Amino acid sequence: MTIKRTFLIILTCLLFLSCNKKQSELEFEQTVFYELFPALADSIHFDIRLSHPIPPMPIFDENDSLIGVDTTGMTKRLVDYEKRKAELNADSTRLVIAIKDSVFSIDEIDRKELIIHYEELGIKVDSSNENLNYLIDLTKLKTEYKKIHFKYLSEFPDKSEFWSTKYNFHLVGSTGFSRIQFDKTKSFGVLNSYYSCGRLCGGGYRIFIKNVKGKWEIDKIIHTWVA
């Protein structure tokens, strides 16, 4: 066997092992994403048909010092809210969220914020597997709200007609998620998301996650922008 052929065989084996490692890491990330998805969806989704009751109004004295709150009518507002919520839960309307087909790349600022958020633990960012985005599997998207269904964003009209088009279901919003940036121990992570409920309704989120006794949980959600 020639030296050149031996070198090619070794190089092929190394590339194969590298690809397998990246695939394994990507599969791990997908497992974490789908495990967390019910909590993620519940945290950022809201039904625009259900308006939250107006909170009690603050009461100030002549020196603009807070001296109490006005709870007049609060009980009725809460009762009306729960009644409307029950009505929406009981109806047969098919609710759909348009989701970006594939996860998008994580921003450099999110990597920095991950280190800052867990500064006391001295974590280090895992720099491997950064460029492999993947298609989201709709069959694995579970939510606590059973009436919610997901469709790929690519199946909808473009932005100019997205909200004005008549559908045979109730479009409640659109969303998308980034890759997950883990630390080197795969114990902490951060991802980015957005949720839109109309042309001028929505926001962006930076979501910190952590592994607690083998189970992934949301640690903290920070609003990054509001429309």
Image: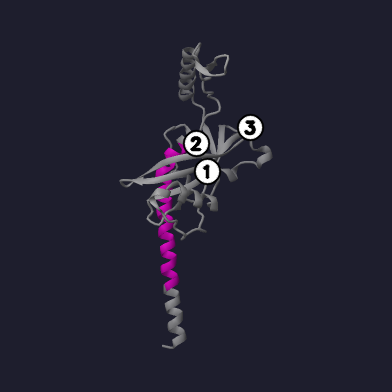
- Write down the region rendered in magenta: 14-41
Q: Nearer the viewer, residue 169 or 113?
A: 113
Point out the tag, 1 or 3, that comes first from the N-terminus: 3
Q: Amino acid at mark 2?
A: Ile
What is the x, y in percent for residue 155? 59, 43
Give the secondary structure at mark 2: helix
Residue name at image x 58 percent, y 32 percent = 168
Q: Is residue 203 above or below residue 72?
A: below
Residue 166's disc number: 3
Q: Nearer the viewer, residue 156 or 16?
A: 16
* Tag 2–tag 1 contact (CB < 8 Å): yes
Q: Amino acid at mark 3?
A: Lys
Q: Is residue 116 above or below residue 166?
A: below
Q: Nearer the viewer, mark 1 or mark 3?
A: 1
Quarter of the image that includes the N terminus: bottom left
Residue name at image x 64 percent, y 41 percent = 157
Give the secondary structure at mark 1: strand
What is the x, y in percent for residue 220? 44, 40
Image quarter of residue 172: top right
Residue 44's disc number: 2
Tag 2: Cα neighbours inside 10 Å, few (<14), some, or many (≥20)? some
Q: Is residue 26 above or below residue 74?
A: below
Q: Nearer the viewer, mark 2 or mark 3?
A: 2
Give the secondary structure at mark 3: loop
Q: Amino acid at mark 1?
A: Ser
* Residue that carries the numbered disc 1 in the rendered image: 193
Residue 113's disc number: none
Point out the tag, 2 or 3, that comes first from the N-terminus: 2
Point out the tag, 2 or 1, that comes first from the N-terminus: 2
Residue name at image x 57 percent, y 18 percent = 64
Determine the CA span between mark 2 and mark 1.
Answer: 9 Å
Tag 1: Cα neighbours inside 10 Å, few (<14), some, or many (≥20)? many
